[in-house]
Amino acid sequence: MNAILVTGGAGFIGSNFIRLVISETDLSVINLDALTYAGNLENLKDLESNPRYRFVQGRIEDSALVEGLMKEVDACVHFAAESHVDRSIKDAQPFLITNCLGTQTLLDAARSTGLKRFLHVSTDEVYGSLGGDDHPFRETDPLLPNSPYAASKASSDLLVRAAYKTHGLPVIITRCSNNYGPYQFPEKLIPLMTINAMEGRPLPIYGDGKNIRDWIYVEDHCRGLLKVLESGAVGEIYNLGGECEKTNLEIVEAILERLDAPRSLITFVKDRPGHDRRYAMDISKVKEELGWTPKVDFEEGISTTIEWYKANRDWWERILSGEYMRYYEEHYGGLS
Ligand code: NAD
Ligand code: TYD
């Protein structure tokens, strides 16, 4: 493998992945990204003049564009997506266009260009929600998505599966748990709470705050993706996760403690409709077959993340001054 196409590489996980690939492999990377509200070229500023990196602005639903780009590469790592559950509750349409139609467009282009490997980056949310005593999700569990976001990702997983079964396309699917780390857009739990706590603003916790997520540091996820890209078996699904279940309240408390901010900032707000109670991943398959395990424990990962948001105020202030603030106003009726 010499060159890869990364879709959605200007977003949170994609930008961390590209940085890892450039620093730890000899691969060249083409980054195709539409630069939606979540895409930000600042995330990869340090790579702008690297001869092994090229950015192309465009949408994954543009078949002529993606076909042309796929002719230049051996593999595609597909991150591009509408990724935020709350937005999908408000308007599911963009999720279907990018996550479903966009994925099918990439699969069609991969087939017509004879691409050697297509790695589809998916999520634990496709499995639905766990009860407290349920075993963590396994790759063989049924897909029971509950939010429009999760349903659109589950649909894309099935389109990828169908391309493998019907056309023999060399696909692999990974499903990962909740990521956190540098460059995460501040609509997601950890960056939102970190920034609000730094600014002395209320921390809006949905419902009772006891919903559980399995948290993984983004670099661990990216290392897992690289491992699967290099040695995963075609047609397989691999769960990735942090083996780190925490309630949302535990996450917020960890942030408050590190920022020395008062608990009184915690504000319980109306629950998210259809709010999944618990996610947790069984990652024994990827451990046993590919030898990957997450390395960064939560204490280290959350401290590094908070330090990054402290040191990169310019990055998030630029975001907050525009689109995100309008979104926040619409959803939570302002900050007061
Ligand atoms: P993100 O929202 O930060 O980034 C998405 C990127 O895709 C942005 O740069 C955006 O501009 C680009 N994009 C959106 N629509 C596009 C289109 N039609 N054409 C081209 N580019 C487009 O998302 P993220 O958190 O980095 O997630 C990346 C992928 O990983 C997604 O597929 C998501 O479902 C999956 N995932 C995320 C998590 C998580 O915790 N964030 C966990 C598991 C899986
Ligand atoms: P989020 O970061 O949106 O990821 P996902 O919904 O994909 O898991 O949310 C993580 C958890 O935090 C989820 O249970 C919803 C909750 N949450 C809040 O309580 N308040 C918030 O403002 C946000 C954004 C999320």
Image: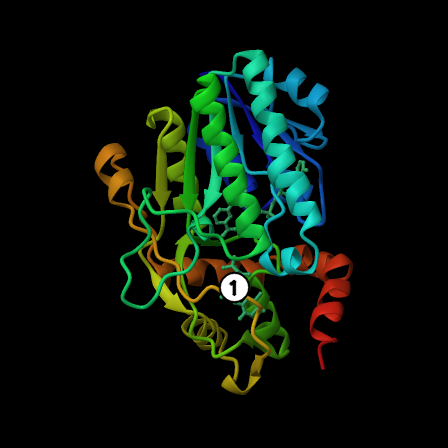
Q: Which residue is mark 1?
A: 190
Image quadrant occupied by the C terminus:
bottom right
Q: Is mark 1 within 8 Å of ligand 2?
A: yes
- Residue for point 40% across, 53% down: 216
* Residue closer to the observer: 36 or 164: 164
Where residue 275 appears, as percent x and y from the top left, is 51, 66
- Residue for point 63% across, 27% down: 105
Horizontal side of residue 96 vs 258, given as left or right: right
Where residue 122 appears, as percent x and y from the top left, is 48, 42
Horizontal side of residue 180 vs 314, given as left or right: left
Horizontal side of residue 325 vs 72, given as left or right: right
- Residue for point 29% across, 38% down: 286
Task: Tell me the kind of residue under disc 1.
Answer: Ile
Where residue 80 appears, as percent x and y from the top left, is 60, 38
* Residue closer to the observer: 215 or 261: 215
Above or below residue 311? Residue 108 is: above
* Residue closer to the observer: 190 or 273: 273
Image quadrant occupied by the N terminus:
top left
